[in-house]
Amino acid sequence: MALAERGPCVGVDVDLARLHMARANVESMPFPAHLVAADATYGPVSGNAAVVDPARRQGSRRVRSGADYEPSLQLIESWQEQFSLLAVKVSPALDLDQLPSRQEVEYVSWRGQCREAVLWFNRESDGIRRRATRIIEDGQVARSVSLTSASDDIQRPPLQPIGAVLYDPDPALVRSHLIGELAMQLGAWLIAEEVAYLSSDQITATPWARCFRVLEQVPFQLTRLQRVLRSNGWRPGSIRRRHFPIEPEVLRKQLGRFESDASAVELVCTRIKGKRTIFICAPVMESAR
């Protein structure tokens, strides 16, 4: 539908049911798509550009290898010969080392999750190799922001203890290994080698991370955490975790009930030097970001 809004296009699928659904969806488009029942493995169409969306399941099982996609990602080189511009949609969890070739990879997040990854070939993007894109909804309008790198070399931010501010980066940025680029923008550092939380001593507005003021750092022990929360008149609001063994809702139940007039705080659960650690935080309002 998005392509048919912009100009004439052809849709190819081996599944007739998918073609019937596509036909119903594009009937009202200004440039209705021409739909073809065929196996895309054999290149039944040609054109200036193509978007390839291979199936990532075999029955009810989600496949992990690009060679098991249908059509297989081993066909990328032959698709490149057919189309001057090529975009291939893949799982964000795909190991890129499996691919026969790659030019640019883009990870796309929406509503706090990394939803898709796209392999781009012959895109005019000044040699970009890695791109993180976040889709932001503002009422009925959606816009996007991107952060990019022209290098495959991953920048590692410095490692330091937590400062006054904690940043929880967007998952597309984490998956694209652009934490170093964001840290440079924020004047921030990593708080643990294996965890993608950043910290600094001052708040810097960014669309690429949730920002929190750090109120307390507590080595995780359930009764100690309960005591710190209650003595300060706090109660757990949102609970987020990285490299932490307890699910947020399980931890919430373990912490028990709190006074209804207590102030809600965010609990950020992670590991610092291998030890389970809780950061008690106050979120920075969007207007301050």
Image (cartoon, rainbow, N blue to C red):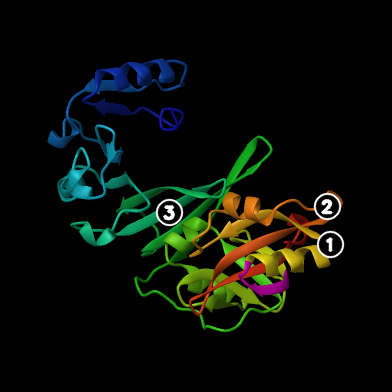
* Quarter where residue 165 is shown: bottom right
Image height check: is 11 above or below 159? above
Which mark is on residue 107?
Answer: 3
**Helix, strand or loop status at disc 2:** loop
Residues 127 and 200: in front is: 200
Q: Earlier in the sequence, mark 3 or mark 1?
A: 3
- In the picture of the structure, the residue carrying the numbered disc 1 is 233
User: Residue placed at 39% from the left, 20% from the top?
Assistant: 32
Distance between mark 2 and mark 3 Cα atoms: 42 Å
Q: Is residue 217 magenta?
A: yes
Distance between mark 1 and mark 2 Cα atoms: 8 Å
Residue 227 picture location, percent across and down? 75, 67
User: Residue placed at 30% from the left, 45% from the top?
Assistant: 88
Tell me: 126 left or right of 213: left
Q: Which amino acid is tagged 3?
A: Tyr
Our reading of the magenta stretch's main secondary structure is strand
Which mark is on residue 259?
Answer: 2
| Magenta residues, start to end | 214-221
Residues 60 and 37: in front is: 60
User: Residue placed at 55% from the left, 67% from the top?
Assistant: 270
Circles 1 and 2 in contact, beta carbons < 8 Å: yes
Tell me: 160 left or right of 255: left
User: Residue placed at 60% from the left, 83% from the top?
Assistant: 161
